[in-house]
Structure formats: structure tokens, C-alpha cells
Amino acid sequence: MIVHTCISAEETMHLGYQMGQHLPDSSVVCLFGNLGAGKTTFIKGLAAGAAGLNPQQVHSPTFVYLNIYNGSRSVYHFDLYRLRDADEFLSLGFDEMLFAQGVCCIEWSERIKELLPSHCIHVTLEHVNENIRSIRIDA
């Protein structure tokens, strides 16, 4: 377990960038945290580090469940906040992306915990105050 304290959105994004640079293909990163905790900000950096993407291209797919970003490799960005359960995830055909080449990032992954591969990396973001986040990474 690694714990970081980030004092700005830029630091949160940079931590994601550093992590993204070291992720092998077929990595699954599960993000946990309340609304506004910085999950999407972290993924912006992760996508830049993992696939050379411009962080401004990365947006939360809250209303469409999934955005796919193509850079030096693919990044699959899920936001499952509105998903009912794992059966809905399966019915949408998303399960194949859990094992695809590239990197899979899942916000609100607890909705499909029974489908997740055992090699997931867990990233938990917590508000310390308005600007400060505590970020715990468990592999």
C-alpha cells in the first residue's frame, strides 16, 4: 500500500500520470471515492502517462458509462455511478474490456466487484479538505 497527499488537482493528475507510465497492458485500475473526490482528475493524468493522451481529452463518462481513448494504447474509462448491477454491465457487453489490451479505469467499480479480475489495482481518494486529497494505492 502506498499513500500520497496531494494538495492540488494538478498534483492529483501528476500522481495519475506517474502511475500510468508504469502500468502494463491489460491493467485494471479501480477507483473509489465520494463524488468530487478527484477520480476523473486522477484518470486524466493516468491516461496521459499510460497512452500519451492530452488530459483535456479525458472526460467522465457518467451518462454513457464508457469513453474509449486511443493514444499509444487504448484507455477504457468507465464511470459506473448510474449502473444498477453487474448484470447490466454484462448485458451492455462491457465485460470483454476488462481483459482487453490497454488500460481499463473504472470509477464506482464496487458495482461490478464480482466481475473484476484478481489483478486489479485499487486507488482510493479521500477529501482531507477542499483542495487536499489523500490517495491510497493498493496493488
Image (tube, grey):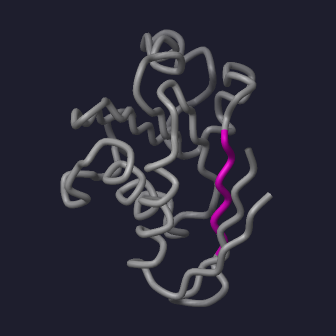
Q: Position of residue 96 (x, y in %)?
A: 48, 11
For the C terminus, which image quadrant?
A: top right
Task: Name the residue nearer the viewer: 37 or 122.
Answer: 122
Report the residue at 67% width, 59% height from top. 124
Picture layout, residue 17 above or below residue 8: above
Asked if residue 10 is among those painted magenta in the image, a careful observer would answer no
Report the residue at 69% width, 57% height from top. 137
Picture layout, residue 119 above or below residue 11: above
- On the rendered structure, is 34 left or right of 105? right
**Extreme-right residue of the structure:** 1
Query: Which portion, as a residue range, is magenta?
Result: 121-126
Report the residue at 75% width, 51% height from top. 138
Q: Position of residue 10 (x, y in %)?
A: 38, 78
Task: Name the residue nearer the viewer: 103 or 58.
Answer: 103
Dominant SS of magenta comes to strand
Q: Position of residue 107 (x, y in %)?
A: 53, 46
Image-quadrant location for residue 116: top right
Task: Name the residue nearer the viewer: 26 or 22.
Answer: 22
Q: Position of residue 125 (x, y in %)?
A: 63, 65
Picture layout, residue 31 above or below residue 74: below
For the N terminus, which image quadrant?
A: bottom right
